[in-house]
């Protein structure tokens, strides 16, 4: 089931022209490389949460090399993943 969700998320991110950075083969997270590199990941993740209700973990939580990334969990239903991606797309934040 997680493999199906992973593939779904990666396909949707590609359709939205968003860069997952790499193809995860374990766990249930994707690190998403976002476009506006002038924004700190913590600031961006907080704005995304406030405006869309979608919780993404700021990459900086994983060390300085994580800046410029947001971590997206696919440990949820396909329906909820699709809804979250639509909200992100509509927000124009990433």
Image (tube, grey):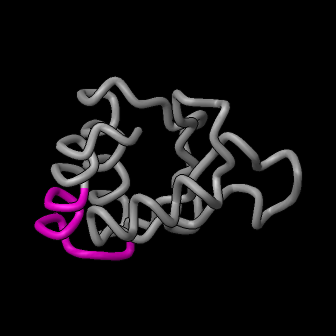
Rendered-image quadrant of the C terminus: top left
Depth check: 61 or 92 in front?
92
Depth check: 25 or 20 in front?
20
Instruction: Check the image and name the residue furthest to the right.
Output: 64
Depth check: 55 or 42 in front?
42
Asked if the stretch drawn in magenta spans residue 82, the answer is: yes
Residue 42 horizontal side relative to residue 36, left or right? right
Asked if the stretch drawn in magenta spans residue 30, the answer is: no
Residue occupying image coordinates x 64% and y 60%: 42
How many numbered marks have been drawn onto this rendered protein structure? Answer: 0
- Indicate the position of residue 68 as horizontal and vertical percent values: 68, 40
Q: Which residues are magenta?
A: 75-84
Residue 21 horizontal side relative to residue 92, left or right? right
Residue occupying image coordinates x 53% and y 53%: 44
Residue 28 horizontal side relative to residue 38, left or right? left
Q: State the predominant SS element of the stretch in magenta.
A: helix
Rendered view: 82 above or below 80: above
Depth check: 21 or 94 in front?
94
The quarter holding residue 26 reads bottom right
Rendered view: 82 above or below 49: above
The quarter holding residue 10 reads top left
Rendered-image quadrant of the N terminus: bottom left
The quarter holding residue 47 reads bottom left
């Amino acid at each position: 089931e997680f493999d199906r969700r992973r593939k779904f998320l990666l396909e949707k991110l590609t359709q939205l022209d968003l860069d997952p950075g790499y193809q995860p083969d374990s766990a249930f997270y994707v690190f998403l490389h976002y476009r506006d590199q002038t924004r700190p990941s913590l600031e961006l993740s907080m704005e995304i949460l406030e405006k869309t209700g979608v919780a993404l973990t700021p990459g900086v939580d994983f060390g300085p090399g994580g800046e410029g990334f947001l971590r997206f969990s696919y440990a949820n239903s396909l329906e909820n993943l699709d809804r979250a991606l639509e909200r992100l797309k509509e927000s124009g934040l990433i």
